[in-house]
Image (cartoon, grey):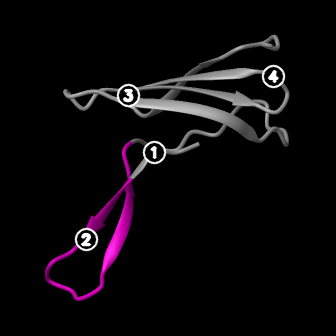
Amino acid sequence: MTCQRIYFWDDQEDKFEFLPYREFYTRKNISNDPIVKYLFILNYDDIHYGISMRKSGRVDLYYNFQLKDATDGKIK
């Protein structure tokens, strides 16, 4: 999952672009395990916290717009 912000450019009509907050890092163990639930919080200081649950039951933790940790076991 990546976090991006949409920018509208004033000098060009109908021009917009998605720009990422952080560099994109690939997961070490790549598998087909889609996200089924997620919750992201962006506080008043523009600090980001997030959690996502994948179809397998594993959970990913996000901070400052990047993946910080992932569980090895499944969560019910």
Q: Secondary structure at mark 2?
A: strand
Q: Which residue is mark 3?
A: 64
Residue 11 in the image: state x and y as whole percent. Answer: 14, 83
Q: Tag 3: Cα neighbours inside 10 Å, few (<14), some, or many (≥20)?
A: some
Q: Which residue is mark 4?
A: 57
Q: Amino acid at mark 3?
A: Asn
3D distance between C-alphas at marks 1 and 3: 10 Å
Q: Which residue is mark 1?
A: 3
Q: Which residue is mark 2?
A: 8
Q: For marks 2 and 3, give the one nearer the viewer.
A: 2
Q: Amino acid at mark 1?
A: Cys
What residue sits 73% from the left and 37% below the top? 36
What residue sits 40% from the left and 29% below the top? 41
3D distance between C-alphas at marks 4 and 1: 22 Å
Q: Secondary structure at mark 1?
A: loop
Sequence-first tag of 4 and 2:
2
What residue sits 81% from the left and 10% below the top? 73
Q: Which residues are magenta?
A: 5-21
Residue 70 in the image: state x and y as whole percent. Answer: 66, 19
Q: Secondary structure at mark 3?
A: loop
3D distance between C-alphas at marks 2 and 3: 23 Å
Q: Is residue 58 above or below residue 15?
A: above
Check whether the beta carbons of the residues at disc 4 and disc 1 lie within 8 A of each other.
no
